């Protein structure tokens, strides 16, 4: 059973990239299974900060082969830019190291324009999407008129499909009072990118199953987070894919018996970008403390959009739910170093809604918006823990905080992160 699924347990940006980079050292293949360049995964190696949007975080380990799975939506123009950026940094990103599923769907300039127009039309009900065209691309996929990556193999056919998609989108854009696209420019750029990506195309379902059969270890790198899942998240303030553990199987094309570990990643406080309920959200001084000023690259400003993230206390109701939905075998907790200096820490252990206690999030946004967190308070710690590498180098208060979280979500926590660098991990 050689596959491990790695999933975000909150609203994204939990530190999945940094944890994937750690697990990739023991993996042969690292595969993304959902989402697209709405993701922004940060990996830090020897002071070099690498931000990945489409390419799996495993690319920084030279022995790893990377896969962009069928469950993804891929913007070919942005993928080419990312490949070129990584190559310029000295990363080997030849077609032997990166395989794009022929069944993945493509994000066209039409999808990007439609995402922007839809958000504008939503007014004060806007989702706060990343404006990368994610929703419209998945809509075309399920409506069964999307363009698959495999179509890039035949440029003439691809050009025709693109032309039709842009004409169709222009009708909608004009009807919504938005600027239509220049078809020649929009198709030209995508065609150039398609030509560049042809050598990377592959039947990755077949590839992954063959590798698994031969005993390779496959790491499935989740994007987004459980509460952004189109089924299990705070609908409609979600993304359009299934970033939870189940999505790894449909998004890559192998069966559940291949999976022996489901690793959840959670930040030791809560953050969210975009709209939607967030019961433990804080404002003022404490929120600013958690967010940071933006001086450090790890401060809470979006990797993809630069937006300041909403910040709040850790929500164990969310973690308990994420553990249930994904069946976590363990949880990795990140950013413990950021909490150093606070006198006390709060954890939401339940919600109170209309006078009734809830141990799990209710399924409607209107109930969630009325949820009052029931807090438990724990002592904080003042020591700088970023240089700790062993559990006996951590203050007792840090260990107690981690232990309590593990208890509340009924999931073992064996590893915590005390900084963004590859080696800033403590095995408990
Ligand atoms: P992802 O989308 O889940 O991969 O997370 P992001 O990369 O968007 O955001 C996480 C941020 O926190 C990045 O800047 C990471 O470098 C940083 N980070 C991850 N783990 C730690 C940690 O333990 N401590 C600190 N200070 N930063 C961390
Ligand atoms: P990573 O992989 C945080 C959020 C957006 C918005 C909602 C829908 O870096 O954790 P979309 O563009 O997907 O239609 O936006 O989902 N969102 C993320 N938030 N991290 C992400 O990815 C996200 N990907 C999407 O902010 O609220
Ligand atoms: Mg991110």
Image (tube, helix red, strand yellow):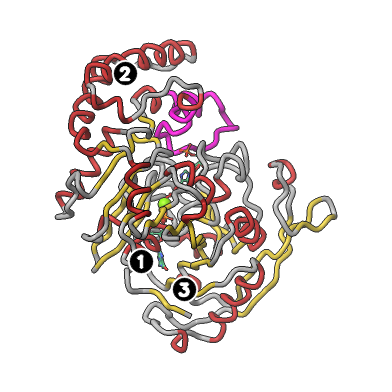
Residue at 61 percent across and 41 percent down: it is: 231
Tag 1 and tag 3, C-beta contact below 8 Å: yes
Q: Please tell me the numbered disc located at residue 403.
A: none
Q: Which residue is mark 3?
A: 415
The first of marks 2 and 3 along the sequence is 2
Q: Main secondary structure of the magenta part?
A: helix
Q: In the orientation shown, which residue stands out farthest toward the front?
A: 213
Asked if residue 160 lies in the magenta stretch, the reply is no
**Cα–Cα span, label 1 and label 2:** 39 Å
Mark 2 CB near ligand 2 (8 Å cut): no
Q: Which residues are magenta?
A: 114-139
Residue 216 at x, y percent in the picture: 33, 59
Tally of numbered tags: 3
Residue 174 at x, y percent in the picture: 43, 11
Tag 2 and tag 3, C-beta contact below 8 Å: no
Q: Please tell me the numbered disc located at residue 162.
A: 2
**Cα–Cα span, label 1 and label 3:** 11 Å
Q: Which residue is mark 1?
A: 22
Comparing 330 with 255, the one in front is 255
Q: Of helix, strand and loop, which one carries label 2?
A: helix
Q: Of helix, strand and loop, which one carries label 1?
A: helix
Image vertical order of residue 173 relative to residue 294, above or below: above
Image vertical order of residue 336 relative to residue 200, above or below: below
């Amino acid at each position: 059973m050689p596959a491990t699924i790695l999933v975000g347990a909150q609203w994204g940006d939990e530190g999945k990239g940094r944890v994937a980079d750690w697990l990739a050292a023991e993996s042969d293949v690292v595969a993304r299974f959902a989402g697209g360049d709405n993701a922004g995964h940060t990996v830090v190696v020897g002071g070099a900060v690498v931000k990945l949007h489409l390419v799996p975080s495993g690319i920084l380990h030279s022995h790893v082969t990377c896969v962009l799975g069928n469950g993804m939506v891929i913007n070919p123009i942005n993928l080419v830019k990312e490949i070129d950026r990584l190559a310029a940094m000295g990363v080997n990103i030849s077609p032997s190291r990166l395989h794009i599923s022929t069944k993945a769907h493509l994000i066209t300039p039409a999808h990007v324009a439609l995402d922007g127009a839809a958000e504008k039309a939503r007014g004060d009900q806007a989702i706060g999407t990343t404006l990368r065209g994610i929703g419209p691309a998945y809509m075309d996929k399920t409506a069964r008129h999307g363009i698959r990556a495999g179509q890039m193999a035949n440029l003439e056919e691809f050009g025709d499909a693109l032309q039709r998609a842009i004409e169709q989108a222009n009708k909608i854009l004009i009807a919504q009072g938005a600027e239509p696209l220049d078809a020649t420019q929009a198709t030209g750029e995508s065609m150039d990118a398609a030509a560049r990506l042809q050598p990377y195309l592959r039947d990755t379902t077949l590839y992954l199953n063959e590798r698994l059969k031969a005993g390779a270890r496959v790491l499935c790198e989740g994007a987004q987070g459980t509460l952004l899942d189109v089924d299990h998240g705070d609908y409609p303030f979600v993304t359009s894919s299934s970033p939870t553990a189940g999505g790894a199987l449909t998004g890559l094309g192998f069966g559940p018996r291949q999976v022996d570990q489901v690793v959840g990643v959670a930040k030791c406080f809560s953050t969210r970008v975009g709209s939607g309920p967030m019961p433990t959200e804080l404002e003022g001084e404490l929120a600013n403390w958690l967010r940071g000023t933006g001086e450090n690259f790890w401060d809470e400003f979006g990797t993809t959009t630069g937006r300041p993230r909403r910040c709040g206390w850790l929500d164990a109701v969310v973690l308990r739910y994420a553990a249930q939905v994904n069946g976590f075998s363990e949880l990795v907790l990140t950013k413990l170093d950021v909490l150093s200096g606070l006198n006390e820490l709060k954890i939401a252990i339940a919600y109170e809604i209309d006078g009734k206690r809830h141990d799990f999030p209710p399924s409607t946004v209107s109930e969630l918006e009325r949820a009052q967190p029931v807090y438990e308070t724990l002592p904080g710690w003042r020591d700088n823990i970023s240089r700790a590498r062993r559990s006996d180098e951590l203050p007792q208060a840090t260990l107690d905080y981690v232990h309590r979280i593990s208890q509340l979500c009924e999931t073992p926590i064996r590893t915590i992160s005390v900084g963004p660098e590859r080696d800033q991990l403590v095995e408990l």
